[in-house]
């Protein structure tokens, strides 16, 4: 199962084990079980503190438990083979079970250990899902830290019947005590916030205790981090408060147009950005959702940002880099069937539609790229574009038209997504030229129609917004409010690209620097008087 390079690397990792661990497999006579036996045998051969047995009797086969020999009450179960994106999750599960300390905030670990109640988690992942590893690792860590928590992590492709039976049409899909708990990506902090009723109050208390920042950045994507790097390197105390650090990067797979980087992936780039914030001593406050901006009345005064958990942070200068999110169609059935056939991430959810008929709505680069990728997996793709022609790059259009299981529809207005109660069964379409209406039978709809800025919370702030809700900025990243700057996809900058957001962030950071050195704090002026 593991090539020589992977075995060598894994052997180096296993050298960090501090105590013995046990791998206990439940197998049948199938090919996947044979592969599981081979994998566990190879792992056990790499270190003397790892033992593998094959006498488990769990109903899911193949599956295997990883547990600490000295404390068998703490365990995690993988059902199916955790390869692909999940191989890292397997390695971490081995290390954490063997006593190697996780690189997680000590307060979070303590919160995990103190969590009350019995929690039996089941989570479905796919091997091509780049959002799934965070959930797998969060549940693994929680189960290994708290004996009242169990985690069974299920590779959906191996257990397709169960996927169908439980109506899983989007991953990561997490169930708690047999009931649907959450669909989507979440790290340990977010998981605990959903389980611990006092988490918001604790987070608010920590934020309220912080001294005012010289620069406070709202948003932790490429624009926000670039701003922070520039202001921190200028010597200003800088903080980043983000609803989800990394923003859209966390949902982006291949990145091939970042100068100096031939290829990377969004989550990997997000990790590098987080590392850079630490290296520049930027204070990061994750899972902090801003709800209101109260701008200072005069230059040099303190701005205030209120958060949904009740906290308030103050800063002499604020940089808004809240990014954007996938735009919704806004048609009947879209909300009702979200994660039940309506999807937004082809890389994550595509494998769940293997051999099925699906539609992709949107003829720009993202839509055409999604259709090309999905055509390799699904039975048939119908690409629907509202305009009279596709808007994607010509090279992508040529590739799309070469595929024999793709139909392209232009001038197509989707009027409704239909279903039979539990999942999508089709969509209704109107030809914008002829007015003709038709129904297309299918089992999935992937929506790729662009972005909408995350600026609703700024509507009453006095900040100038465009008719599309974008923050209006000048060449220096400045808004109409003194001391408040903005950068990235939430602004009027026309091109929504990672490299553009990074440049905008640097511009806004330098703009904030220029503002701070030209405007003394109001309280210091008062003291001098």
Image: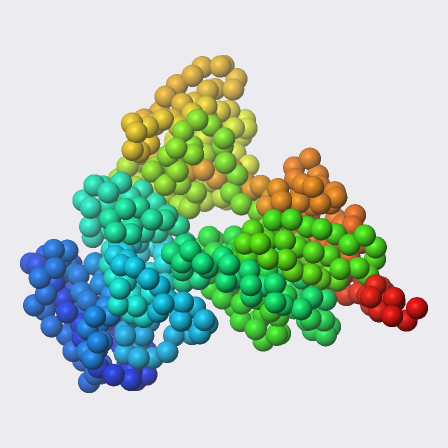
Whether residue 447 sits left or right of residue 16 in the image: it is right
User: Which residue does the image show at 44% across and 26% down from the upper left?
Assistant: 332
Residue 425 sits in quarter: top left
Q: Nearer the viewer, residue 72 or 265?
A: 72
Where does residue 439 sit, x and y in percent of width and height?
Answer: 36, 21
Where does residue 231 sit, x and y in percent of width and height?
Answer: 70, 68
Q: Nearer the viewer, residue 337 or 226?
A: 337
Above or below: residue 5 compared with residue 295: below
Q: Is residue 352 visible?
A: no
- Quadrant in the picture for the C terminus: bottom right
Where does residue 291 sit, x and y in percent of width and height?
Answer: 61, 49
Where does residue 496 sit, x and y in percent of width and height?
Answer: 61, 48
Q: Nearer the viewer, residue 371 or 21?
A: 21
Whether residue 10 sits left or right of residue 306 in the image: it is left
Residue 310 sits in quarter: bottom right
- Quadrant in the picture for the N terminus: bottom left
Q: Nearer the viewer, residue 520 or 469?
A: 520
Above or below: residue 456 compared with residue 37: above
User: Which residue does the image show at 77% across and 54% down from the upper left?
Assistant: 296
């Amino acid at each position: 199962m593991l090539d020589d390079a992977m075995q060598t690397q894994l052997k180096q990792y296993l050298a960090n084990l501090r105590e013995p661990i046990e791998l206990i497999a439940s197998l049948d006579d199938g090919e996947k079980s044979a592969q599981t036996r081979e994998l566990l045998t190879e792992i056990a051969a790499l270190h003397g503190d790892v033992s593998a047995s094959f006498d488990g009797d769990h109903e899911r086969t193949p599956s295997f438990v990883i547990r600490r020999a000295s404390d068998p009450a703490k365990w995690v179960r993988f059902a199916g083979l955790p390869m692909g994106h999940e191989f890292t999750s397997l390695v971490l599960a081995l290390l954490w079970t063997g006593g190697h300390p996780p690189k997680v905030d000590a307060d979070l670990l303590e919160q995990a250990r103190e969590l009350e109640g019995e929690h039996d988690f089941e989570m479905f992942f796919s091997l091509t899902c780049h959002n799934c590893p965070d959930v797998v690792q969060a549940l693994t860590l929680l189960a290994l830290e708290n004996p009242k928590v169990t985690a069974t992590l299920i590779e959906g492709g191996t257990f397709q019947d169960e996927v169908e039976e439980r109506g899983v049409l989007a991953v990561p899909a997490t169930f708690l005590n047999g009931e649907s708990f959450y669909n989507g990506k979440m790290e340990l902090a977010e998981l605990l916030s959903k389980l611990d009723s006092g988490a918001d109050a604790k987070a608010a208390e920590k934020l309220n205790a912080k001294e005012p920042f010289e620069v406070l950045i709202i948003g932790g994507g490429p624009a926000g981090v670039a701003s922070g790097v520039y202001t921190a390197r200028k010597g200003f105390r800088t903080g980043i408060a983000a609803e989800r650090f990394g923003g859209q990067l966390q949902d982006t797979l291949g990145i091939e147009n970042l100068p100096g980087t031939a290829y990377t992936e969004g989550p990997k780039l997000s990790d590098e950005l987080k590392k850079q914030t630490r290296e520049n001593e930027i204070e990061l406050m994750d899972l902090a959702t801003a709800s209101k901006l109260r701008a200072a009345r005069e230059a040099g005064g303190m701005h205030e940002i209120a958060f949904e958990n009740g906290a308030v942070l103050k800063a002499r200068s604020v940089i808004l880099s809240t990014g954007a999110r996938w735009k919704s169609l806004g048609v009947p059935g879209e909300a009702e069937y979200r994660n039940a056939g309506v999807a937004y991430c082809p890389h994550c959810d595509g494998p769940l539609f293997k051999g099925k008929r699906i539609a992709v709505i949107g003829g720009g680069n993202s839509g055409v790229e999604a259709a090309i990728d999905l055509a390799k997996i699904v039975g048939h793709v119908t690409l629907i574009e509202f305009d009279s022609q596709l808007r994607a790059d010509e090279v992508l259009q040529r590739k799309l038209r070469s595929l024999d299981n793709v139909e392209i529809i232009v001038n197509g207005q989707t009027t409704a997504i239909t279903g039979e109660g539990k999942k999508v069964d089709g969509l209704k379409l109107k030809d914008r030229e002829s007015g003709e209406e038709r129904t297309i039978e299918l089992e999935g709809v992937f929506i790729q129609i662009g972005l909408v800025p995350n600026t609703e919370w700024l509507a009453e702030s006095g900040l100038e917004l465009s008719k599309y809700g974008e923050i209006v900025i000048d060449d220096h990243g400045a808004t109409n409010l003194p001391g408040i700057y903005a950068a990235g996809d939430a602004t009027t900058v026309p091109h929504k690209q990672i490299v553009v957001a990074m440049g905008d962030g640097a511009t806004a950071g330098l703009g904030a620097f220029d503002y701070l050195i030209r405007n003394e704090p109001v309280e210091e002026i008062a003291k001098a008087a």
